[in-house]
Every structure is written in structure tokens, then in C-alpha cells.
Amino acid sequence: MTIKLLSPITINRIAAGEVIERPASAIKELVENSIDAGADKIEVTIHNGGRNLIIVSDNGSGMSKDDLSIAVERHTTSKLNEDDISDINYFGFRGEALASIASVSRMKIISKYNDEAWSISVHGGENLGLSPASLNKGTKVIIEDLFFAVPARLKFLKSEKQETQSILEILKKIAMANPHISITLENENKILLQTTSGENNLSEIIGKDFLENAIPIDSNYDNIHIKGYVSYPTYNKGTSSDQHFFVNKRPIRDKLFSAVTKVAYQDLISHDRYPIVVLFVSLDNEDVDVNVHPTKAEVRFKDPSTLRSAIISVIKKALNENSQKTSSTIGFDTISAFSSNQTKSLVRDSTPNYQYIPKSYSTPSRKEIEILQEVNKPNFTSFNITPPAPQPIAPQESFLSEPPLGFAKCQFHENYIISQTKNGIIIIDQHAAHERIVYEKLKEQFRNNSAKSQKLLLPTIIELDEYQVDQIIEKIELFNKFGLKIEKFGNAGIRILETPAILGNIDPSQIIRDILENLENYGEEISLEEKINEILATTACHGSVRSGRILTIEEMNALLRQMEATPYSGQCNHGRPTYITLNLKDVEKLFERC
Ligand SMILES: Nc1ncnc2c1ncn2[C@@H]1O[C@H](COP(=O)(O)OP(=O)(O)O)[C@@H](O)[C@H]1O
Ligand SMILES: [Mg+2]
């Protein structure tokens, strides 16, 4: 075997394999070049998922004839300060992209500088030279037949649709990080993305109701700055495709971010749903190494654990401060459903089955006031089905005059409460709402070691297999802390002696079985804290007012007041909303009154 020096063309093609995996990565490099050149308008055109044709035009600085001739060579860049290679202020700096793309495609670049436009063509790495051209401003890069020179790579490309989708995704991320630039993507005469330059383009990119259903974030944590938007837990998706993370303006693919988001939303959202999150993290250049991967989508952090805590705490704080809100689209969708069913329901159901409620009803009754006072007492731990004895304390006027969740009017289908507020009505899912209240109380009692337990008249014995017994016994202290007292019973059983008082009368063996199922589902993947929350959530579900329980108006109002005093009461432990709001205006629209 003899050793040979590889030809520049081969070297470029090997490098291209690393930098340019697919059309989307070529487009990313070209668009980043345009941004580095100071462009504020970038237009991308593709055909056949970028396989046959990619055109990227910008209105940036352009390149002179001399620069153009060397830009397509390997390791040529205008962006790196060789005295300090850690000082990176541009997207590019390796000087590889143009040479790599040119080595595997038919590339033509036209660029204007100082009133002169030139073009250069490179086919499969062979430089065909410069010629005079015409162009209004900036630079236009035309790539035909990407990967024609490396047919093996063509086989790895996905369908046209999937390639187009990844191009769209990468451009969305670039657009989010650069709202001052207008970006357009056109595929065979169809516009797939169009952003206008401005302060914020998230509604154009994610969807028009995103900002309405998201909480803005702008916080510092040590020397980490985190800015962006996180959706209310009730505004979520079945995939994580709308979770976008940026570090120093670069879109980053890193498990750390999706994992911490999951932890921050942990008990607010069901495990198979994903919140919509756009987060821009800014760190000192020296705290992050972007040079680990040629496409720079992966980075290395000097101190990942501080970053993790920073993101979790910032998101949790935002959610906490907005914990009463649920997404606006829920009420809106419901209204739309009403509207579309209108004719059908009129025909089918001509007799109204609602009840007229006199206006005077909207001021709270004496009994309601008493319950409210009881609820607001610090030791009110459970939703009490029997109203407490009257207490002669003056009501808090300001709160009573307009509690956010209004006053209950009626219950229907034995699970839903209708409450009237200043601006409309609220429909509450009593079971979901109570589940959240019990869960938050359990967590609080767990934290403060203040859980009360209730002795069972007869201890309950459950038979389990040995492994399950070990799993439960291992956590005996933890169960104790929230009022579940158990002990080992022989080798294959446990005995339940006391249950958390907050849950009232429940089936003790079912709790243990559910907890076991939970532990088995999550295994070692989640931390102890997350496990505790899972267990508490499971436990809370047992103690909640079941659907099907008929409540009095006083009991309903007591539930509403408790919701107002409970963090995250806008959604149940599975991320479903506990209540929806229908504005009077929308109701009036349904009746064509406005
Ligand atoms: N759209 C553009 N407008 C102006 N100059 C460009 C453009 N694209 C590339 N260049 C020039 O070509 C050089 C090489 O580009 P590239 O191969 O992508 O390497 P890098 O971006 O890492 O410097 C850049 O440093 C820049 O000077
Ligand atoms: Mg570049």
C-alpha cells in the first residue's frame, strides 16, 4: 500500500460529507453567509426539495472580483481573527462551506461590489473561472444538482417532502434568531415562509395565536441571559417540533434543552404532549464551545449544570406567575364548534334547556362568604363537601366584589360547573380542578412535613411480588412524608395502616397499585424529585372530587375560591385545562347581537 496526498477535489468532497449532509445544511450555510454579509433581505428558492435547484439571494455587502475568485477555495474566510480563534462573531469562520458545496454540485455565484458584478462557476470542484455579470445588489448563489458528484450521498436523501420540511425548519430557526431580517422560502412558485423584518416575527413563524398563549421571558441567572417565550401548559402539541433553542443566536440541537423543558413543565403537562418554547440563551463566548461540530448545531458548555438550573428556574418562575391562565384558543375553538353546529342543534333541540338566572344572584350569599373565609384560612386543607359552620368575620370587599373565577351558577352533567364572571362565563371541570388543588396541597404538605394521615379502621393488606414489595419498602420514608403509612407484611405483601387525610375515604390498595405502575413506567429515567411528583400526582387523582358528584352552589363556590388560591390551577396534573372561559362578546356573536 502506498501513501498518496489526496487531491484538493477529494479533500473537499470528504469535507462536504461533514458540513453538507443534505440540502437543508447547504441552505443553512448560504443563508448564514448572507447574514454575515449584513443582508436584511434573503430569498431562498428551491426545486424538488433542494436536490435540483437552490437559489439564495441577498442584499448584503457583496464580494469583489478578487474575493469572489478565492471565496470558493477551501479555508478562505474573511471572518476569523487568526490572533484569537476563540473570538467568534460571525456564523462562519472555517471557510469551508462554499468550497464544500462547490465540490459536490454545479455552483454559480454572482456578486456585486462597487458597481461591478461578477460571476464565478464551479462544477464538481472544478473552477470554471470568472465572467462579468449583472446584479442589482448583494450576492446570488445558484446551486444545481447538489450531490451529483457524490451519487452515494443522493441515496441517503429523504423524500422531496421531508427534505423541504427540513429546509423550512432550519429557515424558521434562522428567522427567529434574526427578526430584523426578512426571509422568504419559495418552493416551485409556492411561498412556504415569509417573514417581515421587525421586532418579533414569532407569529409569522409559529402561528398567529402563539404570542397570545405564551409567556414572555427575559431573565438573568448568574451570567446567563435567557429570553424568549414559553407557552401556557394548555397550549401544547403532540410533537416537540416547536421547541426552539438558541445559544448566542445559533439554533442548537441538544438533549439538555428538551430535557430541562420537560422537567420545568413536569406536572403541568401530560407525558406525550409538548409545550411550545422559543428560548434564546446568551452566554459569554468563553463559556460555550461552538467548535465541536462542523455544522455548529451541537455545542459544549463549560458549566451545563448551572445552565440546566437556570433554564428550569426561569421557565418555572414564568409558569408560576401565570399559573391561573389557560390558553385562549380553547375558548375560541369551543365557540367555533358552537357556531358550526348551530343549525344542526336548532333543528334537533328546539326547547331550550337552560334556566334563567336573575341578576341579583351574582352577589355572593352569606353562606358563600362563610365558606370563602374558611377556604382562606391557612389550615383549610381539603375541599370540604359539608359547608363549615358560619363565622362572623367581615368579607374582604375587594376580593368578593370580583373574584377572578366568578360565582358558580349551576352544575351540569354532574361534572361541570358554570360560573359567571364580569366578562362572561367559565365552565369548570370539577374533577380536573380538584385534582390540581389536592396535588398542590400534597406537595406543600410533603415539603413542610405537615401531612396529616387518617388511620384505617382495618389495615389493608396487599399481596405483591417480592420485587414490588422491595420497591415500595425502599420508599417507605417518602410515603410517610405525605401521610401514607405502610409496613412490610411477610415476604410478599405490604400492610397499609394510614392514608393521607386530604384524600378522604379512598381505596388504599388502588393507590399502591397505581404508584407501582408509575414507578415501573418511569424506571431510572427520571430523578427522585420527579418521581415524588409523579407519585403525588397519582395520589392526588384518587382524592379528587369524582365526576358524578352533585355539588351545592356553596360547594361549587368553595371550589372556585380554592382554585384561585392554588398555583397552576388552570390545568390538571395531566395538562388538560381545568376551566375554559367564554367571553360575553363571543356569546353575543353566536346570537348575532354584535
Ligand atoms: N453571501 C455572501 N455575501 C458576501 N460574502 C460572502 C457571501 N458568501 C460568502 N462570502 C465570502 O466568502 C467567504 C467564504 O465563505 P464560506 O466558505 O461560507 O466560509 P466562512 O463563512 O466560514 O467564512 C466568506 O468568509 C465571505 O467573505
Ligand atoms: Mg460560511
Image (cartoon, grey):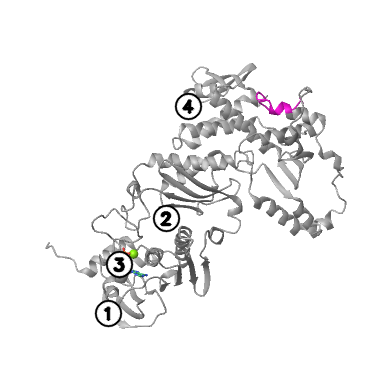
Mark 4 or mark 1: whose residue is earlier in sequence? 1
Of mark 3 and mark 4, the one earlier in the sequence is 3
80 vs 189: above or below: above
Quick check: 513 left or right of 130? right
Residue hosting label 3: 100
Q: Callout 2: few (<14), some (14-19), or many (20+) C-alpha neighbours within 10 Å?
A: some
Mark 4 to mark 1: distance in Å? 71 Å
Q: Distance between the residues labelled 2 and 1?
A: 36 Å
Q: Mark 4 — residue?
A: 471
Q: State the image quarter where residue 390 is shown.
A: top right
Q: In which quarter of the image is the C terminus?
A: bottom right
| Dot 4 alpha-carbon crowd within 10 angstroms: few under 14, some 14 to 19, many 20 or more | few
Q: How far apart are marks 2 and 4 (CA)?
A: 45 Å
First in sequence, mark 2 or 1: give its number: 1
From this view, report whether residue 67 is shown above or below residue 202: below
Residue behind mark 2: 249
CA gap, disc 3 and disc 4 = 56 Å
Q: Is mark 3 on a helix, strand or loop?
A: helix
Q: Tag 2: residue type?
A: Lys
Examine the rendered structure and indicate whether residue 87 appears above or below residue 270: below
Q: Distance between the residues labelled 3 and 1?
A: 16 Å
> Judging from the image, what secondary structure is the residue with disc 2 in?
loop
Amino acid type for the residue under numbered disc 3:
Ser
The percent coordinates of residue 470 (x first, y second) are 47, 24
Q: Which of marks 4 and 1 is in front?
A: 1
